[in-house]
Image: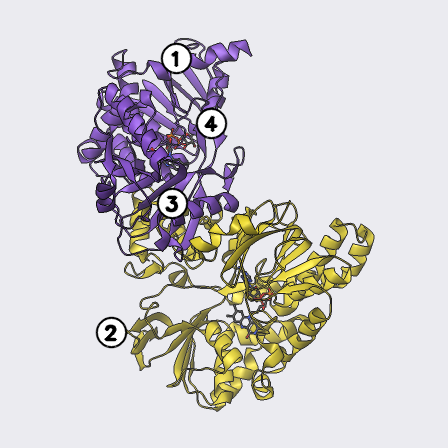
Chain colours: A yellow, B purple
Amino acid sequence: MVDRRYELAVIGAGPAGLTAATTAAGHGLDVVLLDEQAAPGGQIYRSIEDAPARRAELLGPDYRHGAGLVEAFRTGGAHYCPDTSVWSLGADREIGVLRDGRASLIRAQRIIIAVGAMERPVPFPGWTLPGVMNAGAAQVLFKSSGIAPAQGTVIAGTGPLLLLLAWQYLRAGVPVSAVLEMAAPGHFLRAVPRLPAALLAGHYITRGMKYLWQLRRAGIPVRYGVSGLRALGDGTLDVVEYLRHGRRVRIASDSLLVHFGLVPNMHLAEAAGCRHRWDEGQQCWRPVVDAWGNTSIEGIAVAGDNAAIGGARTAAHAGHLAALEAAHALGRIDARQRDTRGKDDRAWMRADLRIRPFLEALHRLPQSLLATPDDDTVVCRCEEITAGEIRRAVREGHADPNQVKFITRCGMGPCQGQQCVHAVSHIVAAETGQPVAGQIPLRARPPLRPVTIEALAQLEAEAAPT
Amino acid sequence: MNADVVIVGGGLVGSSAALHLALRGQRVMVVEKNSPGRHASGVNAGGLRRLNRHLPEIPLAVAAAEMWRDMRTLVGSDCDVKLGGQVRVAENDADMHALEERATQVRALGFTHEQVIDRDRLYRLVPALAPHCVGALYVAGDGFARPYHALTAFRHKAEALGVDYRTGLRVTDVDRPGERWRLMAEDGGVFEAPVLVNCAGAWAHHLCASLNEPVPLTVGAPMMMVTERLPMFLEPVVAAASRKLSFKQMQNGTVLIGGAHRGGHDLARETTSIDFRRLGESSRNAAALFPRMRDVRIVRAWAGLEAFLPDDIPVIGPSLTAPDVYHAFGFCAHGFQLAPVVGRILSELIVDGRSSLPIAPFSIGRFQKVAVAD
Ligand SMILES: Cc1cc2nc3c(=O)[nH]c(=O)nc-3n(C[C@H](O)[C@H](O)[C@H](O)COP(=O)(O)OP(=O)(O)OC[C@H]3O[C@@H](n4cnc5c(N)ncnc54)[C@H](O)[C@@H]3O)c2cc1C
Ligand SMILES: Cc1cc2nc3c(=O)[nH]c(=O)nc-3n(C[C@H](O)[C@H](O)[C@H](O)COP(=O)(O)OP(=O)(O)OC[C@H]3O[C@@H](n4cnc5c(N)ncnc54)[C@H](O)[C@@H]3O)c2cc1C
């Protein structure tokens, strides 16, 4: 089923990819949607088709919004390949896919990459200890299988997901010992109500007030102005330590869930050679795109959180726009039809752009989190390279991220630098005194998902006839 | 700085030339458009091979092998060399016959490093090898090093001796208005020196064109892939008589698989792309010789830009059209091993006026007849 050519391949079945695939199929395109999950929905609408009513209820109205998207996709006529990982993407629009351990290569005339975002990995002392986990990942586990830390947990980091998750745990009866907010305190809750309501409704990141109020009422400590986070323990996590008002505080806990916002999943676009630029507002790399999501590589577009972090609603609009552009490029609609049909989406995107600086300012991470000052902290988990080793490499003349990678192996492991690319950029920038924007980010090398020799060995036999 | 010699290209060949020239008291400047080691010299497979060299390369490869063995003396670092030997495996009698002929040829030139070994010896050296092989050609003391570490060691030593690296500067043109060469850089900078050395790797033909000395250089992008870490199971580097394969286990347990398969490239944008169908062939070859590799995961594949020449050996020696210009390029995917000695040869040519090793076969003149005939 995957071994052939398509007019359009969409990678990722979140709100962006679902909308793109449905829209394109609706315009008569021969579309395939590839996603490594077992069911459509992406991060936010994960397992939406089979969430038990009570859990969907617990997770709030957001979650149910996705049901409509998924249903439209199911009946819309696009080919769907679940459990299918994309492990390579070339500028020639050849896609390496892996399904049931079998690798194959498919081609499409147009590609829309809609692989979403990942939680920003922030190295801090002890972050690799078992017991420390990303809060978003914990939330996904909770959403998809109802699993939560049995003995309770501490939730730390920045942004509204902390409150959201604490609130979801509260409603499910999971003990939360504290919520530790590490961004600049205060102005978030005061400012949010003054922003355009229609847009904010789509931003999960702006719904904190209700959660905060309910958490406080339940007696869960929510601390602002936290710094110096450390995870301590001999082999596994025992104690969470932090600084607040100049005092060192310790909490005994075998679980620490951290979240420091989202960064685009940049690796597929990067591997294809799409130009990236540093987004100072979002403190991350992202692909250079036009209003339709077209990247610098002909025929390859990006849509959704992997283009820029904007939330589920924005992702859906972006997916719609990218699909209209594909329909136009493949001759199904003319430019005028494309422009007319994309009018609402573009209005939404423009409004979204207007509030973005405000949201970005709210969620800026302090330098101490971006570039850990602690030399012993591991930055590259795959190759176990510390911040100190990176700094030493820079001092020895390896003055950009890719030279640091060559000499230290930082970013050469199975994750291809997806975990450390941002931290390395910040550390190198701080050490050289040069802005991140002037760097070339750690180069992503395929395969972006490990592929066995056996699977590669079958490639020729499985290749599509040309 | 008032340089005696300016070198275009800060790869391992340019850096080795710089180091050897500095050791001979020359003031050297290296102009590099990216960062040293950004291209072939930083991303190659690190193979240190005398085994199966082109015949004219043998004296150079043998001299280079001696330098690698004692690399700490030259650059203050062993460059992570591991000299566990290299074998070229015969999978049938025809293979074995070809390898025996090769060994005879090499012996006739007075070299004894390539030995034919029988099946028993082969399996003692490479117990993990698939059982069908019949023997091999073997060079003890061949092996590999870590390329970017080697490049860094050469660069640091050269810098310690006063070599001036100018990085991020692309040389766009050269001329010689008087007695000195003048190099124009993209940013408007100008460098001058009496002697010019072309170590520009996959871009060397551009410099040749400026010198009115065209060469039939083609650019290729050899591909490599590396596996996850495995328990140590392999000492020598393994190649095969009738397969495109190079297979070695690195110090950290990962296995590096190459085999001269080429990917795509764009020289102007300086990018490469992976052709997974061809890596599929490398995978089949690896699995045929090491069945245990089937379930092992590949974690990274890459390609590097390399200069190739039609007869598969480099150009090393003076320009025949321009005075005080020396070339060293076109290493056809086996220049890493040679780089230490090629740098020394360039320093001899420039300082002494002659090379201590035979370099006539590498003259650029071998192409000029062809170029004229065109
Ligand atoms: C851990 C996490 C938790 C979040 N929690 C919330 C929340 O509670 N509330 C909220 O409003 N927002 C949340 N967000 C943000 C929200 O998920 C996004 O704004 C929204 O989902 C973006 O939609 P998208 O279509 O761009 O990408 P996504 O919904 O992320 O979809 C991307 C899809 O691409 C697939 N994919 C990725 N790489 C590959 C590959 N190589 N091969 C094949 N498939 C691939 C993924 O499996 C996924 O299904 C969360 C984000 C993350 C990362
Ligand atoms: C994947 C791969 C595997 C290989 N494996 C092996 C192996 O196992 N063993 C082995 O012996 N060899 C191997 N090789 C070959 C070896 O890497 C090369 O032959 C060798 O590194 C060539 O060195 P160099 O200095 O000439 O070239 P390079 O390292 O390419 O250096 C040339 C430099 O010149 C610079 N430059 C070019 N033009 C200009 C200009 N106009 N201005 C300024 N700077 C310029 C470039 O930026 C570049 O850095 C391999 C090559 C590749 C690609």
Q: Is mark 2 within 8 Å of ligand 1?
A: no
Label 4 neighbour load within 10 Å: few <14, some 14-19, many 20+: many
Point out the frontmost of discs 3 and 2: 3
Point out the frontmost of discs 4 and 3: 3
Residue type highlighted by circle 1: Arg
The Cα–Cα distance between marks 2 and 1, rounded to whole angstroms, is 66 Å
Q: Is residue B280 above or below residue B209?
A: below
Q: Secondary structure at mark 4?
A: helix
Residue at the spot of label 2: A234
- Image side of residue B342 versus residue B66, left or right: right
Is B58 in front, or is B293? Answer: B293
Q: Residue at x 34, y 35 (%)?
A: B93
Splitting the image into four quadrants, where does ligand 1 fall? bottom right
Q: Considering only order in the chain, which callout, 1 or 4, is on the residue closer to the N terminus?
A: 1
Q: Residue at x 47, y 58 (%)?
A: A449
- Image side of residue A462 versus residue B14, left or right: right
Q: Which mark is residue B257?
A: 3
What is the quadrant of the N terminus of chain B in the image? top left
Q: Is mark 4 within 8 Å of ligand 2?
A: yes
Q: How far across and how far down the image is residue B142, in percent?
A: 25, 35
> Is the residue at mark 1 from the same chain as the one at mark 3?
yes
Residue at the spot of label 1: B180
The Cα–Cα distance between marks 4 and 3, rounded to whole angstroms, is 26 Å
Residue at the spot of label 4: B203
Label 3 neighbour load within 10 Å: few <14, some 14-19, many 20+: many
Residue type highlighted by circle 3: Ile
The Cα–Cα distance between marks 1 and 3, rounded to whole angstroms, is 46 Å
> Is the residue at mark 4 from the same chain as the one at mark 1?
yes
